[in-house]
Image: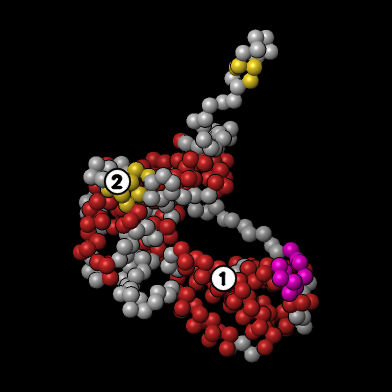
Amino acid sequence: MDSGVLPRVDRQLMLYQRWLTERLADIEVLEHRRHLQHFATWHQMRRLRSKAEKGPLGRSQTGQTKQEITQAGAFLAWLADRGRTIECCQQADLDAWHTEKLATRRPAQTFLRWCMKTGRMPRLALPPQVINQDQAPLHQHRRLALLRRTLNDDSLPLRARVAAALVLLYAQPVTRIVHLTIDDVFDDGASITVRLGDPPSPLPEPVADLMRAHVQSRQHLPYASSRSSRWLFPGRQPGQPMNPVSLQVHLRKIGVPPQRGRTSAIRQLVLQAPAPVIAKALGYHDKTATRLVTEAGGTWSRYAPGDHTRQPATRPSRSTGRPRT
């Protein structure tokens, strides 16, 4: 596929389809198998194919999808042990199911919402998701110290230094970093920009030098797949980017916590510029950026996004009849 001999098909999507076939074959109850097959065909596969059209799927995406099928099947079997079918499911059943092992059984909620939406079960209430705030963002001084070390310590791996700079300076998640290509990097000899959002973000000089060196070093990586790949962070599998879990490991090895570093960076950025501007430049959703402004105590609540270059409308003055703004 990478050489163009075979038509390109997403590898993770193929592996999931094979796993699904084997998983469904192990389910003895015909009615349970039918529900899961419809859910996988009309909900999961449509979602995965849509994502695969935009870029290669990651293992975490198909891993979550497998968990949904596994827990959905477990719920159907658990419900049958209580003498009920999904069509006759009651609120007490859902409450009991989630009370026993909430964290483990949460992936089944995707299947349950789909069943309610398609009329396969009554519309019942699901427990809300509780977000734990254990991973507090880094202190600003700590983030700047890590960024300074990343830029100045030549003993650190170059690939990890570039990724760390994108996390600590531009608040990019590793799942988005690994899907950058060399076509997203624009170098005119005087400056470098990276397409993270719209418009591309300029890299300051220390980071720009690291990016130039990283782009040139891709041709000398020990695995041949990187030489023909357009990925900025190529993986070992032909045509595949680097696994985001692997990149997280590299970042932690140099002392950069990916999630906490990204959270600290985005909270600092939304305090320095309006949330809509930051969201558009860095590829974030407007609602996400606005929420972060509120959490960080921002002062841009009256900022109105849009074109501010237009001249204001005029209307005549009551006293003179001449136009006024």
Question: Can you tell which mark lies on residue 192?
Answer: 2
Residue 20, quarter of the rendered image: bottom right
Question: Can you tell which mark lies on residue 46?
Answer: 1
Q: Nearer the viewer, residue 148 or 310?
A: 310
Name the spot of residue 191 as percent of width and height, x first: 27, 42
Secondary structure under tag 1 reads helix
Mark 2, Cα crowd under 10 Å, few <14 / some 14-19 / many 20+, is: many
Q: Residue at x 76, y 67 (%)?
A: 123
As drawn, which residue projects farthest toward the bottom?
28
Q: Is residue 148 visible?
A: no
Task: Tell whether 198 sits left or right of 221.
Answer: right
Task: Tell whether 237 sits left or right of 220.
Answer: right
Task: Tell whether 89 sits left or right of 60.
Answer: right
Mark 1, Cα crowd under 10 Å, few <14 / some 14-19 / many 20+, is: few
Name the spot of residue 61 as percent of width and height, x first: 49, 68
Q: Amino acid at mark 1?
A: Arg
Q: Is residue 281 visible?
A: yes
Q: Residue at x 68, y 13 (%)?
A: 318
Q: Amino acid at mark 2?
A: Ile
Point out the stretch of residues depicted in magenta: 116-125
